[in-house]
Amino acid sequence: MLRQLEGSQAVARAVTLCRPQVIAAYPISPQTHIVESLSDRVRTGELEACEYMMVESEFGAMSACIGASGAGVRTYTATSSQGLLFMAEALFNASGLGLPIVMTVANRAIGAPINIWNDHSDAMSMRDSGWIQLYADSNQSAVDLHVQAYRLAESLSVPVMVCMDGFILTHAFEEVDLPEQEQVDAFLPRFRPQQALDPDDPLTIGAMVGPEAFAEVKYLMHVKQMAALDEIPMIADDFREAFGRASGGLLQPYRVEGAETVVVALGSVLGTIEDVVDTMRDEGVAVGVLGITCFRPWPVDEVREALRGAQRVVVVEKAFAVGAGGIVGQNVRDAVRGSPVQVYDVVAGLGGRPITRASLRGLLDDVLADRVDPGRLYFLDLDHELVQRELERARHGERPGPHAENMLRALGTVASGAYE
Amino acid sequence: MAFQEIKLYQTGTFVAGNRLLDPEQRSVQARTGRSNSITSGHRACRGCGEALGARYVLDAAMRATEGKLVAVNSTGCLEVFSTPYPESSWQLPWLHSLFGNGPAVAAGVAAALRAQGREDIRVVGQAGDGGTVDIGFGTLSGLFERNDDVLFVCYDNEGYMNTGVQRSGATPPAATTANTKALGDHPGNVFGQGKSVPLIAMAHEIPYVATATVAELRDLEYKVEKAMTFRGARYLHVFVPCPLGWGADSADTVRLARLAKETGLFPVFEAEGGTLTEVSRIRTQVPVEDYLRPQRRYAHLFGDHPRPDIVARLQAKADRNIVRFGLLPEGDE
């Protein structure tokens, strides 16, 4: 049924339809609306036979999910930013134990400087945690990915995080087609845990493993993620059949046929990029865009295939490896290794900075005119003058003070909220 | 009921020998049908207080719950010595996740059981003092505050023994550890204000809090069984000497545990809803020196350069406990 809903409300409804039995969550913006709504749904009885745990931290939230999942029930949590990092140790533990927990990550920047707005530094920092990572480009996609995430997690006994852009999606009202309960029940079978704490069949879970088997256990995690590359498209096919719309899958190509230049990106920025692509296509420029829905596992063969024929690949990403370069870009380079394609690493939208059509158009014009050096990390819309001023300032005086505060002062009233 | 003869009586104490008790009062360990939740063959050190404590705690809990029990374990000696796979010692469902999250994991298990309508299955969380009073403290406080239906047991051996005997928030003043050596003017660990998690647990006003030692194992079993009669968060703090970490003779584990209580250094008590209900009184008061001398971690107090001043401060600490908890035998106060 079509409804006009806030993204968080839509996700809370989707999660409710999946019937989790334990939800453990700790507040952090911009994920809070999701778990507030779920708390209501447990209290009113709309979500039956579910325990909602108000834990003392995100570390506690993920740990409670580990316990609950270990006891054999479907579990859910949501977090963002610092919260995801505070969970880090438990994230690796959940994946190492093979517990099919599903979590929403309302993507948000990581401090310092503290910043509540959207980028992908949080999820990207956990890309090697052993969790499957799916990125939603719209609220409809977020709803659908949650339903698919449970099926995926439980079929492989692997945890899945569904990433959706904080505020841009979580707080945006959009038209969303919510599935019916019967449809979800038919699509998502009852959870049959691969392992469970049961006095009638006492198992030891979480034993110490030494060099004799550690590599094999870790290798098995890799094998399962590789299996997810087959499983995800099959689940997307089943989903299309059951719900009548295409959603999920590994990649989301848009007008890549015959494209000489392909933009690669994840999340909500895809819509803006598609608009730019449409405009440029109308002008006769052969551009397309490849959306990455599944970033972990990395669909290396599918990306290589999708980018076959492109001469330039512009990776626009909302995070970067400080001191190294692009993160998605690095993975894309791996996929196109051996082919003559030129890969550009572009960092954009950090800490909530809008990625506008004008900026993207300017970027693509610069790339096409060879004004961008593909050998160097490119920062879209960076205020170079502000950076130079601060570097200059820092060269003088014995204690030049903190950069962030100095740069805010240099910006003046713009920094107080009047960002243009 | 089937019983087997075991030696539980302890010479030099007033603890009743098991064989002298009525069958109903005998230790769970005397029953051939005991669960052996942590079974033999594990790799604990000789004389390990924690292995002894865990055995009594879990078998008593198994008896109280008629075998419907799940154990969650924080990282530490108990986890390491019991599970070098495939040699798990656990004969009950057992989950280990991390060092600092045992209480949260246990709470998650309890929530899952409740959601499934399986509240007949009970949950025990276990950790050493590091996993309880330090790194797991936040999640433990959360468990208490939410009053989750978990019995959380701390096996307190007063240091990070698994990592090579470093100081924890439960290490007593003046004790030497790998990072509180008696060097220069430093007499081992600092004289801090202490960190009593039993008292902190009481401040959360949870249904039941108790302390116990491995010197009085029937008392320990009694407290476990009593804890299982309550619903909600319960906390049991068990004093478990560590021969390796304390530099003590393996044969002295039970003796040291008894001396810790009889000096007043480790008060043994019970509390319900935040109020002290019972104290286990000292039978024969002994000076702290009797407890300190057999332990190499206090050797610097008695060597060529003795520190009677520090011993006096430790005695003052014991005396303060005696007054605070009313530990002297009735009539001696």
Image (cartoon, rainbow, N blue to C red):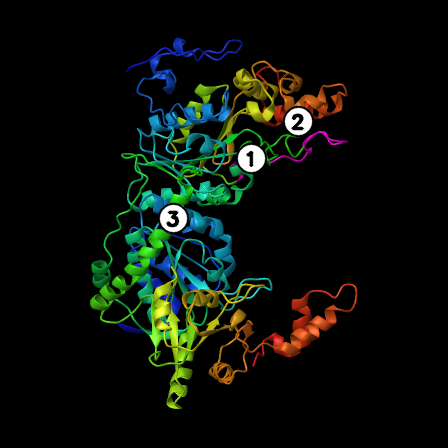
Looking at the image, the residue that sits furthest to the right is A397
What's the residue at 54%, 36% (across, down)? B130
Which mark lies nearer to you, 2 or 1?
1
Residue bounds of the magenta highlight = B181-203
The amino acid beneath tag 2 is Lys
Q: Which mark is residue B317?
A: 2
**Chain letter belonging to callout 3:** A
Residue topped by disc 1: B163
Task: Give the camera-side residue of A333 and B33.
Answer: A333
**Chain letter belonging to callout 1:** B
Q: Can see residue B108?
A: no
The amino acid beneath tag 3 is Tyr
Tell me where residue A148 sits by quadrant. bottom left
Tell me where residue B172 sits by quadrant. top right
Residues under labels 2 and 1: Cα distance?
28 Å
Looking at the image, the residue that sits furthest to the bottom is A283
Image quadrant where one finds the C terminus of chain A: bottom right
Residues under labels 3 and 1: Cα distance?
28 Å
Q: Can see residue B100?
A: yes
Which mark lies nearer to you, 2 or 3?
3
What's the residue at 56%, 15% (across, down)? B283
